[in-house]
Image (cartoon, rainbow, N blue to C red):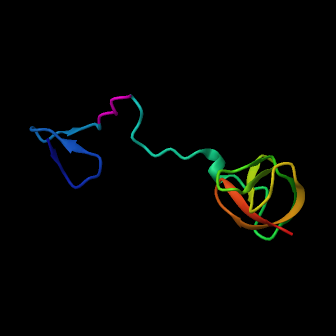
Amino acid sequence: MEEDESFGQERNEEGMEGERRPRRDGRDRGVSIKPSYFLQKPVKAGDEVDVTIEAVASKGDGIAKVNGFVVFVKGAKQGESMKVRVTDVKARFALAERI
């Protein structure tokens, strides 16, 4: 089978275009992005919010949640309640520091 310039199209010996074969496990080859990636975040950089640390991450940062959105707080311990300032917001989590 020869591949021409058009992406994803293959030609067989007769020159006819063929369809892309699915993966062996049956899944599509496309990229999958979860819809939550595009939703508006409940916090933005500069916001000051009250949080309670629910757990501690493997690197020692406290883990809190604001409306289900994960916020990492540097140096916080589990069970602490505090006011934090959000310093950075990523697609799935935010970083904050204690005020």
| Percent coordinates x, y for residue 65 in the rendering | 79, 50
Q: Residue at x 59, y 45 (%)?
A: 34
Q: Residue at x 86, y 48 (%)?
A: 79
The C terminus - image quarter: bottom right
Out of 38 and 47, give the one closest to the viewer. 47
| Percent coordinates x, y for residue 41 in the rendering | 74, 56
Residue 26 is drawn in which quadrant?
top left
Q: Residue at x 69, y 55 (%)?
A: 93
Out of 83 and 19, give the one closest to the viewer. 83
Q: Which residues are magenta?
A: 21-25
Q: Is residue 26 left or right of residue 46?
A: left
Where 41 sits versus 23, above or below? below
In magenta segment, residue 83: no
Where 42 sits versus 85, above or below? above
| Percent coordinates x, y for residue 7 in the rendering | 29, 51
Residue 24 is drawn in which quadrant?
top left
Q: Is residue 40 left or right of residue 33?
A: right
Q: Main secondary structure of the magenta part?
A: loop
Q: Is residue 62 left or right of residue 9?
A: right
The N terminus - image quarter: top left
